[in-house]
Image (spheres, rainbow, N blue to C red):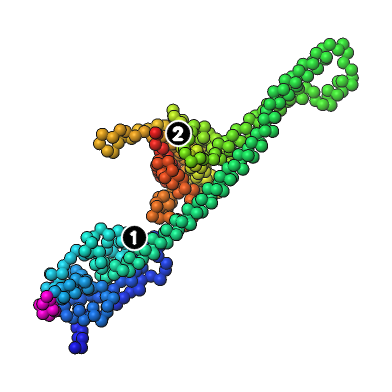
Amino acid sequence: MPQEFSSLISSPILSVGSDRDLGLESTLQELPVYNFQVEISCTGAEVANYLEKYPLLPGAILLERGKYVGMISRRRLLEILIRPYGQELFVKETLDVLYSYARTAILLLPDTTSILAAMQHTLRRSPEFLAEPIVVQTSANTYRLLDMHDLNLASWQIQGIETQVRYERSQAQMIQNDKMASLGRLVDGVAHEILDPVGFIWGNLTYVSNYSQDLLKLLAVYEKGSPHNSETIQQLKEEIEFDFLEQDLLKALNSIRNGAERLKQLVAGLQNFCHIDEVFPKPMDLHAGLDSIILLVKSRLKGEIEIIRNYGQLPPVSCFIGQLNQVLMNILIQCVDALLDEAARQQLHPETTKTVKKPRIEINTAVISKEATKLNAPDSRWISICIADNSLGMSLQSQQQILESFSVKKRADKETSLAVSYRIITARHGGKLNFRSEIGVGTEFEILLPLV
């Protein structure tokens, strides 16, 4: 029997979707969807003929006078027709009658929905509806059908890509950790080598200072005890500027002592910063760690940035010392760079600057308590480290980019220092990393570490 097709039904059209590679942010717009719209005044036999001619067609969008009213899937229509006496009863009936028997819950999603989000929506459906196609609403307020097979295939592709990316990143992170550990051991060895000669200088400075004082006293006694100072001695004292030498010798020794002390502090700070973490966390004097890092940061400054420390009473913090030092260094460098950029902008364009403020970084530490979210649970105690600057602040776009880099679902092609810091604080230490920024006021980073 030849098939007859209604002139009121247009042939199905399959849009192939996007030809670019799928990613985590890919949406339903990039998948192939079927455009097959049928008026409910048509009969079931007419739709069945189209389904027979197009075996991949998942169903039909139902319209009443051009307006969307629902969807009937291939499976639901065939279930009705294969019932006992189904063809005799329903094949000549209009779609509105058939739809009253085959009406099911329809998953309707906008075409801007991400593929992974759409997959999550489908998995929440009852098992009997898992194979039902999805109705996709376009921006032009038209409706298309998405086959579950195409959605499943795209979802598996994206998950496979994400798994591969995570594997490659974990491998790169392991290599980076090995490099950092090797660098830490190298720096620690170099620091020890520097400390040895510094120790010699520091240890002998006291003796040199005492010896020089004794020699000056001896010369003074000789000068007083000698009845007649020879012209040769007077001439030599004038040539070597003995009076100036006597005054400047102590200043030179003090300068050497200060330089050796500063070098010792820098080397000690470098050793603390390059601490090699072990398997288990260790208690750390947080303020000592902050002081060491501030000393290292100040080595690139010339006094143009004021660093204010408001330290509270903190107990030793159990942490991975090397990683936490890396976080503190990353945040301080972020603040320093923002302030230096603002200072450079003010120098280049002084006419656009209304008020010139002294660049400042303020560090506050304290133990804080937070109310428990669960009933009868004790309040939690946290170590709070706030690092704030008075820079120009971040734009909303920059803040959004930072928040997206913190997200597990959205990973940038290149890891930023703040994203690494966020994972160290949250994943490795069970803490929190928050930041706030306001244009014209500045940016504040807050690290919260649980106090066990």
Q: Position of residue 399 (x, y in %)?
A: 41, 49
Q: Position of residue 9 (x, y in %)?
A: 21, 80
Q: Position of residue 178 (x, y in %)?
A: 55, 48
Q: Residue at x 45, y 44 (%)?
A: 424
Which amino acid does the dot numbered 2 rest on?
Answer: Val
Q: Please tell me in which quadrant of the rendered image residue 450 appears.
A: top left
Which of 277 and 408 lies nearest the eye of the viewer?
Answer: 277
**SS type, badge 2:** strand
Q: Is residue 340 visible?
A: yes
Q: Quadrant of the N terminus?
A: bottom left
**SS type, badge 1:** helix
Q: Residue furthest bottom?
A: 1
Is residue 238 found inside the magenta-colored segment of the image? no
Is residue 93 found inside the magenta-colored segment of the image? yes
* Stretch in magenta: 84-96
Q: Quadrant of the C terminus?
A: top left
Q: Residue at x 33, y 74 (%)?
A: 15
Which of 131 and 116 lies nearest the eye of the viewer?
Answer: 131
User: Dot 2, how many residues are within 10 Å of its Cα: few (below 14), some (14-19), or many (20+)?
Assistant: some
The residue labelled by disc 1 is 116
Q: Please tell me in which quadrant of the rendered image residue 227 appears.
A: top right
Q: Please tell me in which quadrant of the rendered image residue 31 appears.
A: bottom left
Q: Is residue 170 above or below residue 72?
A: above
C-alpha distance separating marks 2 and 1? 40 Å
Q: Is residue 135 visible?
A: no
The disc at residue 317 is 2
**First of labels 2, 1 by sequence position:** 1
Q: Position of residue 400 (x, y in %)?
A: 40, 52
Q: Is residue 274 above or below residue 397?
A: above
Q: Residue at x 79, y 16 (%)?
A: 218
Q: Residue furthest front?
A: 84
